[in-house]
Amino acid sequence: MPTVSERVVLLPGDGIGPEVAEQARLALEVLAPEVALDERLIGAAAIRATGSPLPQETIDACLSAVAVLKGPVGDPEFEAAEVRPEQGLLALRAALDTYANLRPAVLGEVDVLIVRELVGGLYFGARGVRDDGTVFDTCEYHPRQVERLARWGFRLAESRRGLLTSVDKANVLETSRMWRRVVDEIAPEFPEVQVEHMLVDNAAMQLATTPQQFDVIVTENMFGDILSDLAAAVTGGLGMAPSASLSDGGPGLFEPVHGSAPDIAGRGVANPVAMLRSTALLLEHGLARTEEAEALNRAIEAAIVSSPTIDLGGTASTSDFGAAVREQLAVDGVASSSYGGS
Ligand code: NAD
Ligand code: IPM
Ligand code: MN
């Protein structure tokens, strides 16, 4: 039996999820052959098999693993259903308390890291229907939730170019005014970091027009959801954007920014870069294997040039791309040098 520290849970998910997850599995088998991949159900696949989008077995397996690698969830069949695939994802993030969601977007002179609060705000506030038929969702934050997320932003900015942009809607929202106050209160602890506040509508415009101005962005859950798709779009597309969701000491959750892409699912043409880059983030943050993470990122870069997928203007299939990554890893000799060729 592998020990806990050697077990990674793999959640393939729905739509293109299993297609891109397969390439991540094959890459991990080369880069970290001693790590046991424990495949479990989430999302629509889990609803069909068990009635629940996040079966208790999946939660237990994730809580006791060293890290979780997840494909996207979501299926048009359940869009209007009472029990939906996305509920499984939100429940998993909450169960793992992975509040710090790192979404890097890098291309050329653009290098922005969005740090999205992931277990609070509009996604987790009170919701319901009033007697008169009004439907409501509420954005709620405790200052402690903002503080722990902001500290991630400051620490990351300190280790990078030293600029932290806190994005909010303080001209309208109470939660945003508290957010600003908390960020300003922490700022003196990080004298090397320059802090600026930006309203979210302007931030969207600035990201679209001059994304190179940003270093680290910290923001509320839903603002971060929307801005990270935009950041992906200006740095190569949704097929390229990975994420790492981290907690205080528990297993991290690594998944692409993109969804299950029902419009292209089942055809073997999805771009696996976002999933493979998420695997590199897992190697770095989840398994502390920095060398293997760097090797995987180098191999992905090479494959983007040699075997681009359709969304990148090429003709490679999902599995062609994965094969090109593994060929490059073999050329690089990383797997054999680190593990004695075993
Ligand atoms: P989407 O991200 O699935 O797709 C948006 C567009 O980008 C589509 O045209 C799609 O074909 C394209 N695309 C996305 N990933 C791609 C890839 N790897 N390669 C090539 N093209 C890619 O967004 P959507 O259509 O709004 O959502 C579909 C489903 O995914 C919904 O059920 C949604 O809830 C779910 N979703 C899940 C996650 C997650 O699990 N983390 C994230 C986002 C959306
Ligand atoms: C993401 C997705 C999820 C989110 C959905 C599927 C719940 O869009 O990871 O960006 O909004 O967080
Ligand atoms: Mn999203």
Image (cartoon, grey):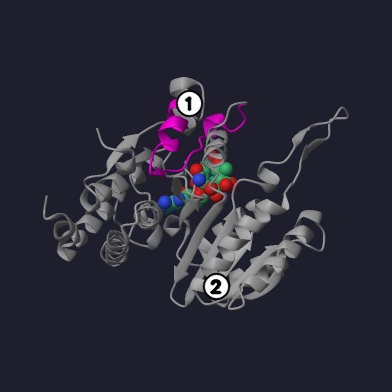
Indicate the quadrant containing the N terminus: top left, top right, bottom left or bottom right: top left
| Count of numbered circles on the image | 2
Circle on res. 215: 2
To which quarter of the image does residue 184 belong?
A: bottom right
The residue that appears at 54% across and 71% down in the rendered structure is 157
> For this rendering, which residue is in front, 268 or 279?
279
- Amino acid under label 1? Gln
- Tell which residue pokes out farthest to the top in this image: 50
Residue position marked by numbered label 1 in the rendering: 56
For the residues labelled 2 and 1, the Cα–Cα distance comes to 39 Å
* Mark 1 surroundings within 10 Å by alpha-carbon count, few (fewer than 14), some (14 through 19), many (20 or more): few
> For this rendering, which residue is in front, 190 or 337?
190
Mark earlier in primary sequence (2, 1): 1
Q: Is residue 280 magenta?
A: no
Residue 324 placed where, x, y %?
A: 23, 58
Q: Is residue 257 above or below residue 132?
A: below
Q: Is residue 304 above or below residue 252?
A: below
Q: Is residue 251 visible?
A: yes
Could you tell me which secondary element the residue under label 2 belongs to? loop
* Mark 2 surroundings within 10 Å by alpha-carbon count, few (fewer than 14), some (14 through 19), many (20 or more): many
- Amino acid under label 2? Asp
